[in-house]
Amino acid sequence: MVGNKGIKKYLTIAFFLLPSLVGMLIFVIIPIIASFVLSFSKWDLIGDIKWVGFSNYIKVFNDPTIREAFKHTLVFIAGYLPLVLSISLGLALVMNKKLKGIVVFRALYFIPVISSWVAVSMIWKWLLNPEYGLINYLLSLIGILGPGWLQDPKWAMAGVIMTSIWKDIGFIMVIYLAGLQEIPDHYYEAASIDGVNRWQKFWYITWPLLSPTTFFVITISLINSFQVFDQVWIMTAGGPAGATSVLVEQIYRNAFSYYKMGYASAISWVLFALIFTVTVIQNKFQKKWVNYDE
Amino acid sequence: MKSIFMNGQSNKKSDVKQRTRYPKLFIGILILAMLLGMLSGCAQKAVETNEPTPDASSSTAPEATDTTTTKEPVEIKYMTFSAAPDHLEDLDAMIAEFEKQNPDIKVTYETYSFADYFTKLQTVVASKTAPDTFELNYENFVTYASKKALYNMDDLMKADADFDSSIFNSTALNAFKYDSKQYGLVESFSNVVFFYNKDLFDKANLDYPNDSWTWKDELAAAQKLTDADAGIFGTYAPIQFWEFYKTIEQNGGKIFNDDKTEVVIDSKENIETLQWMIDKIEKYHVSPSDAQMSGQSDGDLFKAGKIAMLRTGIWMFDSFKDADFTWDIALEPGNTQKAHHFFANGVAISKDTKNAEAAWKWAKFLTSSKEAAKIRVDSSWELPALTDESLLTSYLEKTPPESRAVVFKALDTLVVPPVIGNWNELTDLVGKELDQAKLGQKTPEQALKDAKTAIEGILE
Amino acid sequence: MMNKSRFKKLIFYVILILGSVAMLLPFLWMLSTSLKTSDATMIFPPEWIPKEITLDNYKEVTTAMPMGRFFLNSIFVALTSTFFQVFICAMAGYAFARIDFKGREVLFYIYLGTLMVPSQVTLTPLFIIMNLFKWTNTYQALILPGMFSAFGTFLMRQFFKGIPKSLEEAAFMDGAGYITIFFKIIIHLAKPVFATLWIFGFMASWNNFLWPLIITSDTTHMTLPLGLAALQGRWTTDWNVLMAGTMISIFPILFVYIFTQKYIIKGMTHTGLK
């Protein structure tokens, strides 16, 4: 009887998980394992594979270009993550209101997300233009002499961060919006009857009940921002003078420009170890603040 | 729990509606998807018929007579970056002509933008599914030849009685040799010359640039042509690696010694050259800085009449032809000697091909046949590197610019890029140092010293 | 009281409209550039409303390449892979959220871990696998990898974890199993998150560039981003033509987004169910 139940349970699990597992294994996990194996090799993709042990990893830790790229990646995360998360949460709260025409606004705020990076980069290069750009013009109105932005090594990363935030808030907003739908209206109704004010509603109802979504958003954004690439590649290609060079940009260059697949894989796995550690730590802390109904 | 059911009750109507609606939505999508699949099946045929086929009248005739002994035509694949987006029709025309001459060979092609081409090529070579023939620019040719991905053409050349290598520009053809074996045929080239705005010269009462000009003459003219109030700058050349390796040769400098065993990028001549490139912006103010260019390309600025003299590629002819001033080209001024860019594309055969002979025929036709050369010249799809000048008359007759012959005169002093195995890495490393010198973060001397160390780190 | 709330609403609208303008900039710029002659694209500072409006760029985009074909391919690939992705992720996400089994945490970490390896280094191995199956340049090679998403599984898991358990307990008491509960109850609650994953999956597939670049090799199978990339020359690019192509390419996503948003709002009126 118990065995029967066990079998039934495993059949159920298989039913739910197997389609996903098989596909993930073939199309995702095996290629990932292959890249791990390749990280111990020297392979230019054209000739034969040579095995080189740990030398790629030793090189990663002694490569000044990678060290710079690592620093810039951290700067990007520090500037991007807190702002994009808070702005998009605020926006989602507004968009969740039952206002007239809100659907139109939701669509408008999503436009940057669906615009191509090429187009976005063109317009932002213009907005950030030191002499004619709108942003420096606005700064001049309040008496600030704007910097050279993308042409100035000190400010180029700030320009990339601003553009990224602007492009991504719509994306995160949509996830928050889906999460907000889960919070039952009657919680708020009950709270209103008790005379609870807006902030208290947010802190005691919205924030805790939204926490599984917030946890998701933080985890995903952290993983993605460690792998920032597209905007850097299209806007600055890592310049000026390497000031916006980031890790995945270096991985891409090594894999597809320098014919060093082995080294690119090794950098990727160091990056993996880094992201994984951060995620595990974050996962440990989640129990303190993420509220599941269990 | 009770409250849930209560709520459920009140929502029953919409709940039922929801339940029936959901499958409908997804079935709808599924049907749509299947429909599209079928639709694309039909479209497939449409596209295939669109593909280049030899002139209908000429191709059906031999087939009709041959029906009893129809030989399956050999299919040759070709991959190119230079055809899209502007020359697909020209490539179709070349293929049509080739298939007319070789009814037993059928050519299909794939085209990608230059930026993505090598990502694609590298993957198909890695999985041993490379196309029979593919296009390579000179720099990447060296990489692929050195990694032994290409077919040695020497035997094919010898076996082919019709082939005469003297129809090629010999410097250009030799560029596609590696280890003194021919691994590619030169297909086309492009170069960089000295463009100038005649109207601005006339206004300043200056003589036009001529072939004996040096950097000093250029600077003297630039200082007279620069008009800060009108936002007009005398001269411009970008500060980046490609410009650098040519400019140092104009001053007798080099990146490597002759057998590429030693890095000489930090020589006295080179430091002087880099200083000169920077001084035009920072000291003499005759060239715009990046900030002053405000995101516009040098070509845009020239066309807008804001730059009087510009070093740029002959691929800009087309874009400049409707400028509202007259312009012409000259040889680039040098300091101690002349030097001009040379960007060549070649056609190589994959070492894994099963149809080397057919591939050879196609490569030969594409690079050196009169028919292909004519299509190429007429459509300004770069230039064939052939010695037969009669092929170029239609190109030379076109204006502007009036002095088109300069394009070919520049070949006498061409500089081949100083390619090594790790070329792309070299260009990135040196590019970064040049950036730092341009931004004033390093002196030219320091930047080139650091570049030397960086290059030595990647020499194999 | 009434006035105060009306004033607040006004402020909301003002902020929202100002934000929308900033959000719309690139879209307007794309639109304006796509209607310009190539000379007008060089004018600086750019003109927002071109003096001479032309539709030639749209014509050129559609004639230079079989864009119609690329468009259909993109739609077909995006629709099929997203359709399966939503279901496969929902099922896996439900197992991760609700069913206890040995190794669940480890397996979940493996799923999460797959998001942490940059795709740049897994593309070539994946291509070699497809080549082993003799699937290069096929629709299945374009579609299948898009059906499995660790991101989607994670999104679903988080969503299901947020659903009050009490809802399922009632059904359990009635003797229903996980499968029945999933199809009878959970799926109906998951509308907003389904719609969300649907739009993300569609977008990811629609914009995917590197994988179609590597796996396809003829115009029969190529997708829209490849067609757009082919509009960029080695030395020069006609921005007006490229932007016309880009305009064509973003409309389907905008349409899908507006379509799915309807479902996200619908979900709101049913929250009473919980």
Image (cartoon, coloured by chain):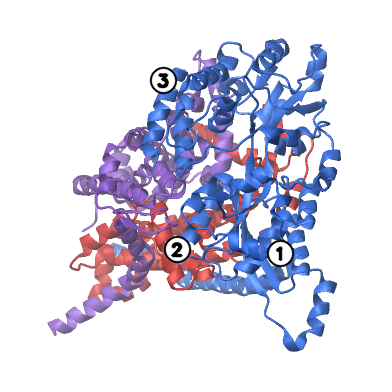
Chain displayed in blue: B
User: Amino acid type of disc 2?
Assistant: Phe
Q: Residues within 10 Å of mark 1 (few under 14, many from 20)?
A: few
| Residue A233 horizontal/vertical position (percent) | 48, 40
Q: Secondary structure at mark 2?
A: helix
The vertical placement of B75 against B117, above or below, is below
Host chain of mark 3 = B
Front residue of C141 and C110? C141
* Residue B177 seen from this side: yes
The numbered mark at residue B161 is 1
Q: Which residue is mark 2?
A: C127
| Residue B90 horizontal/vertical position (percent) | 75, 55
Q: Which color is chain A depicted in? A: purple
| Residue A7 horizontal/vertical position (percent) | 20, 81
Q: Residues within 10 Å of mark 3 (few under 14, many from 20)?
A: some
Q: CA distance from mark 1 to mark 3?
A: 56 Å
User: Amino acid type of disc 1?
Assistant: Ala
The numbered mark at residue B446 is 3
Front residue of B186 and C203? B186
Query: Residue at image x 32%, y 40%?
Result: A202
Host chain of mark 2 = C
Q: Quadrant of the N terminus of chain B?
A: bottom left
**Most extreme residue toward the left, as rendered?**
A2
